[in-house]
Amino acid sequence: MLLLLSRRVSLSFVKQVIPRGPNLFSKPAFLNSRSFKFKVKFSTASANATIQNIITMPERRPFVRLPTDVYPVNYGLCLKPDLIDFTFEGKLEARIEVVQGTNQIVMNCADIDIITASFTPEGGDEINATGFNYQNEDEKVTLSFPTALQKGAGSLKIDFVGELNDKMKGFYRSKYASQSGEVRYAAVTQFEATDARRAFPCWDEPAIKATFDITLIVPKDRVALSNMNVIDRKPYPEDQDLVEVKFATTPIMSTYLVAFVIGEYDFVEGQSSDGIAVRVYTPLGKAEQGKFALEVATKTLPFYKDYFNVPYPLPKIDLIAIADFAAGAMENWGLVTYRETALLIDPKNSCSSSRQWVALVVGHELAHQWFGNLVTMEWWTHLWLNEGFASWIEYLCVDHCFPEYDIWTQFVSADYTRALDLDALDNSHPIEVNVGHPSEVDEIFDAISYSKGASVIRMLHNYIGDEDFRKGMHSYLLKFQHKNASTEDLWDCLEQASGKPIAAVMSSWTKQMGFPIIVVDQEQQGEDRVLKISQTKFCASGPHNGEECPSWMVPISICTSEDPGCTKMKVLLDQAETTVTVPSVAPEQWVKINPGTVGFYRIQYSSPMLESLLPGIRDLSLLPVDRLGLQNDLFSLARAGMISTVEVLKLMEAFVNEPNYTVWSDLSSNLGVLSSLLSHTDYHEDIQEFIRDLFTPIGLKLGWDSKPGEGHLDALLRGLVLGKLGKAGHKPTLEEARRRFKDHVEGKQVLTADLRSPVYLTVLKHGDSTTLDTMFKLHKQADMQEEKNRIERVLGAISAPDLIQRVLTFALSEEVRPQDTVSVIGGVAGSSKHGRKAAWKFVKDNWEELHNRYQGGFLISRLIKLTVDGFAVDKMAAEVKSFFESHHTPSAERTVQQCCENIMLNANWLKRDADDIHQYLLQRKAPPV
Ligand code: BES
Ligand code: ZN
C-alpha cells in the first residue's frame, strides 16, 4: 500500500507506458502473454499552471491498517439501545484467533466507552485486560493484557456503552412522528464505510470477515431487524417491557455490512420466484407505499440469480425506509436501508421520476448483495468495483423490469456525461486510488467511483459482449464468494472468459485519471473511407499541453449512415494515432465514431465530418443517444475553449424538433449551466429568451395534460419542458402554472404528481412572499417525504433577496430533515446570482453547525459543491480556497480543489466567449433586413 505518500497521487498526471501493438486490427502480440503487467509511471507535468497555482496540495493523514496478529472468527454481539436516553449498552463475545503471541489487541473503536475486557484462551483461564488505550484520531483502541496471549483460539469479551448519536452514522437515532403526531425515535445503523466501530469494538476493515450472532434487547412493542432471520424471541428477564430477539448466524461477512433497526414499522411481503422471503418495511400506516419496491425487488432477485448464475445466499431480504438517512440507500446484507424517497411510492402522489429512482436504487442495492456482499473488495481502493459495478447493473436490471423507461439513454445523460465532466479536471483522481484514513475513504464516494466506474464497465461489457461478460462474472463470484477480491481479480476472470486483453485495456482506464479526446479526420479513397484517428488527454482547460501525454487503450466502434444503429467496424486504439480503412462507404454517407456513445471519451471531428453529421440531428436519423452525445461533446469542447460557444448555441437550435426526453434533458442541463454562467453578465435575460424560443414548440406540442396512450417518458418530458419554460419566464406557461397552483391550493383540482415540480418552480421563481408562505404551508401539510423534498428543492427559485434569506433559514430549521438541508441550500445557490452569493455567505456563517451536523461525511462535500461550483470570478476561487484553509474539512479536500478549478474554468470561459455569445443572442433577435 502506498499509504505514506506525501502528496495525493491524483494530483499528478499519471503517465501510462503501453507497449505498442503491431497494428490496430489484430490482438497485439504482447497481449497474448498472460504475464504482461500494466505499468504506470508518475509524471509531474501540469496542464494548467494558473489553476494549479491556486490549489495547494494537502498532506495525506498518516494511517496504518490493523495488525494481523489477531483476527475474529465470530462476533457474538448483544446490544440494548435506550430509545429515551439515546444510549446503548453492548456485550461482545468474539471468538478470535491469535496468530502470533502478543499481550496487546488492537481493534477499531470510536465514541465508545469500554467498561471491561477479558480474553479466555480455549480451555484456559480468563485474563482481564489491564488497560484500554484509545487512539482517538486513528479510531482504534489497544487492549493490554498482563501476560502474553498465546497462539491459538480464544474468546474476547468486552462490555461497553455508547451514544445513539444524531449524526446518521454508526448506531444512531432517527426521528419520526407517530400516527398521533408524537415525536419518537428509532435506533438504526449506517456502517459503511468505517462506522461499525461506533457501534461495537471490531476489526472494521472489509477484508477482515467473520460471522455474526446478533441479539437485540428492545421494547416489546418495537420491530427489531438485523441481517438474518429471527431464531428466538423471549421476554428479557430483567425488564418485562423488553424482549430479547436473537438472529440466525450470518455467513462470513465484512463489518460495514452489519445492520440493525429498532422501531415502529408496517410491512408488505412477498416471495421471489426463487423462494426468498422479501419484505418492504414502511412507516406505520404506509404499507401500501411499499408495494412498488416489493414488486421491483421480487423481480430483481431472480434476475440477478440468473444473470450471475449464483443464488442469493440468505433466507430473507428486508428493505426498510429510514426517516433520517445520509446516503440514498445502503446494501447491508439481508437488511437494505433506504431514504424514504428511495423506497416509498404512492400511486397517486408519487411522480414518474420517483418511481424510476426507486427502481434504480432497489436494483443497485440488490446487486450489491452479490457484488460487494458475497464478494467484497479487499480494500477501499477497490471501492469502485462495488459502486461502479452496481451503478452499471442497476440500469440493466431496470431495463429488464421497465423496458419502457429507455433507461440506457438516461444512463448517458445521468452518469456518463457527469463522469466525463468531473474527470476532465486536473483535480480528478484515478478510479483506483490509494486511500487510508477514513476521511480519505469518505472522499471517494464520488462520481469517479460511481459514474466513471459504471461507464468504463459499460464500455467493457460492450467490448467483451454479454455472453463472455456473464461467464466471467460468474467465475469471479464463484471463485471469490465469501472472500475478498481486487480489481485485478475481476480482470483475470473476464480475460479468461473472453480471451481478450482485459487487464491491459482496463488498467489504462482505472489506474490513470482522465480520458482521451479522439480526434478524427477522413478521406475518401475510391470506395473506401480512410479515417485518421488520434488520441490525446482531454482537459477541461483546453488542449493538453503537458510534455508527456498519457494514452489509453481505446475500444473504438465505427458506424455509417447506411445503418446508424449498427457497428460496422471495431478497432482497438493502443497508440497515439492510426489510420483505419472503412470499406465500402459511398462519398455521400457519413461516418460516425462511437455509436451508442459507449466509449469513455470525447470526440473532435474535422469540420467536414461534423457538418455531415449535423443533418442527422434535424432528421433524427442519428440515434437519440448519439444526438445527445454529439451535443454534449460539443458543449464540453466549448467550455474548454476548443470551439466557440456560439457554435453550440447554433447546434442547440437544430434540436427544435427533438422528440426524445433524455436528449432534451441533457440539452436542458447544459443550457442551465450556460444560463448560470451568464447570470454573471447583464444579458442574462437574453439567454432566457433563447431558452423560451427553443422550448416553446415542444411545449405547445405536449400541452399540460397527458393524452391517452402516453407513457413514462412523455410524463418526464412534459415536466421538464414546462419547468424550463416556466423558469425562463414564458408568459403563457407562467399564467397556466399560476392558475393550476391556485386550484391546487384551494383544493379545487389537485395537481397530478408529475406536474407539481414544474408548477411549484414556476410560481416560486416569479412569486412573492405570499407564494413562499403558501409553499411553506404545503410543506408542513405534506405527509409524504417525497412531497416535502419536491418543495424543498425548488424553494431556492424565489427571487427576492429577503425571501431567499427566509429559505436559507428554513434549510436549517426543524422542518427540514438533516440530510435534506443540503438540497435546500444547493437549490438557492443554483437558482440565481443573488442566491449563489447568499448561499455561500450562509454556509460560511453557519459553518460550525453544518460541519458538526454531517461530521465531515460525504454530505458536506455535496453541500460545498452545490454552493460554490457556479461562481465564475477568479477571486471567488481564492476566497473559497482561503475559507477552507482555515476551516479544515479533510473529507472534502478534493471537492474544494475541484470547485476552485471549476470556478477558474468558468471565469476563463466567460472572459473568452461572453462577448460573442452576447452578439449572437442580440443578432438572432434582430429582424431580418
Ligand atoms: N454503498 C452505498 C451507500 C453509501 C454511500 C455508503 C456513501 C457510504 C457512503 C450504496 O450502495 C449506494 O451507492 N447508494 C447510493 C444510491 C445508488 C442508487 C447510487 C446513494 O446513497 O446515493
Ligand atoms: Zn452502491
Image (spheres, rainbow, N blue to C red):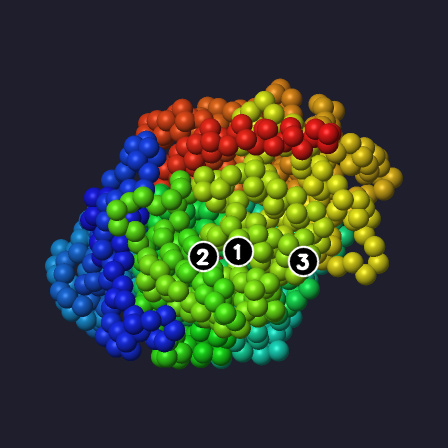
Q: Is residue 523 above or below residue 756?
A: below
Name the residue at 59% across, 34% down: 675
Per the image, label 3 sits on a secondary structure element best described as: loop
- Viewport quadrant of the C terminus: top right
Q: Residues within 10 Å of mark 3 (few under 14, many from 20)?
A: some
Name the residue at 52% across, 71% down: 527
Query: Which residue is under mark 2?
Result: 520
- Tell me which numbered mark, 1 or 3, is placed earlier along the sequence: 1
Residue sitting nearer the eye, 695 or 236: 695
**Which amino acid, mark 1?**
Met
The x, y position of residue 787, in whole percent, is 68, 44
Per the image, label 1 sits on a secondary structure element best described as: helix
Query: Which residue is under mark 1?
Result: 609
Q: Is residue 414 above or below residue 229?
A: above
* Whole-number angstrom distance, CA of label 1 to CA of label 3: 17 Å
* Whole-number angstrom distance, CA of label 3 to CA of label 2: 23 Å
Which quadrant of the view contains residue 150? bottom left
Which quadrant of the view contains residue 149? bottom left
**Which amino acid, mark 3?**
Leu
Query: Which residue is under mark 3?
Result: 620
Q: Residue furthest front?
A: 526
Marks 1 and 2 in Cβ contact (< 8 Å): yes
**Which amino acid, mark 2?**
Val
Per the image, label 2 sits on a secondary structure element best described as: strand
Q: Is residue 757 above or below residue 236?
A: above
Residue 557 left/right relative to 611: left
